[in-house]
């Protein structure tokens, strides 16, 4: 078990974000100290890391929780626990949003090239 500060440091997330995620039900502490401080397990850390990987897709907190629950519930077939229409929605959205992220990254690369000094200037 680890305290929230250790988890925050290990995953590179703020204490405030972790507390908020706990408060809204996205990630729950697996325990509490006698003094009421949150305690997390390695499995909790893995869930936080999973959610952090999903964040760039821009899903709501509720959607992140739904998707994380599904993935954790059936690692072999991550969306099997969801109704077929919902699973397909997530697949379609993730593909479309990934394409948008790829375009944004390409645009960022183009901008970086424009600001780099060129030989002979």
Image (cartoon, grey):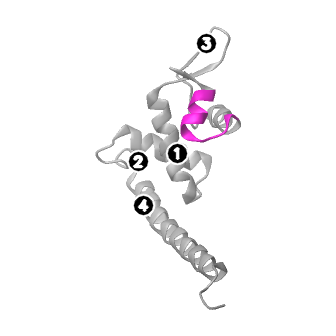
Q: Nearer the viewer, mark 3 or mark 4?
A: 3
How many angstroms separate mark 3 from mark 4 (CA)?
39 Å
Q: Nearer the viewer, mark 4 or mark 2?
A: 4
Magenta stretch in the rendered image: 5-15
Mark number displayed over residue 91: 4
Residue pointed to by mark 2? 82
How many angstroms separate mark 1 from mark 4 (CA)?
16 Å
Secondary structure of the residue carrying numbered label 4: helix
Q: Nearer the viewer, mark 1 or mark 4?
A: 1
Residue at the image point whose x is 56% and y is 75% from the top: 109
The answer to which of marks 3 and 4 sits earlier in the sequence is: 3
The answer to which of marks 3 and 1 sits earlier in the sequence is: 3
Label total for image: 4
Q: x%, y% of residue 10?
A: 54, 35
The answer to which of marks 4 and 2 sits earlier in the sequence is: 2
Residue at the image point whose x is 62% and y is 91% from the top: 120
Q: Is residue 107 left or right of residue 102?
A: right
Mark number displayed over residue 92: none
Mark number displayed over residue 51: 1
How many angstroms separate mark 3 from mark 2 (CA)?
35 Å
- Label 3 with label 2: CB-CB less than 8 Å: no
Crowdedness near tag 1: few (<14), some (14–19) or many (≥20) residues, C-alpha within 10 Å: some
How many angstroms separate mark 3 from mark 1 (CA)?
25 Å
Crowdedness near tag 4: few (<14), some (14–19) or many (≥20) residues, C-alpha within 10 Å: few
Type of secondary structure dominating the magenta stretch? helix
């Amino acid at each position: 078990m680890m305290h929230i500060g250790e988890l925050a440091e290990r995953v590179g997330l703020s204490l405030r974000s972790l507390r908020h995620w706990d408060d809204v039900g996205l990630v729950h502490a697996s325990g509490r100290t006698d003094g009421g401080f949150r305690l997390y397990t390695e499995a909790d850390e893995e869930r936080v890391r999973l959610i952090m990987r999903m964040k760039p897709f821009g899903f709501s907190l509720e959607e992140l929780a739904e998707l994380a629950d599904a993935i954790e519930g059936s690692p072999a077939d991550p969306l099997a626990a969801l109704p077929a229409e919902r699973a397909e929605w997530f697949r379609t959205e993730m593909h479309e949003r990934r394409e948008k992220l790829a375009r944004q990254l390409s645009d960022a690369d183009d901008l970086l090239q424009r600001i780099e000094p060129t030989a002979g200037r």
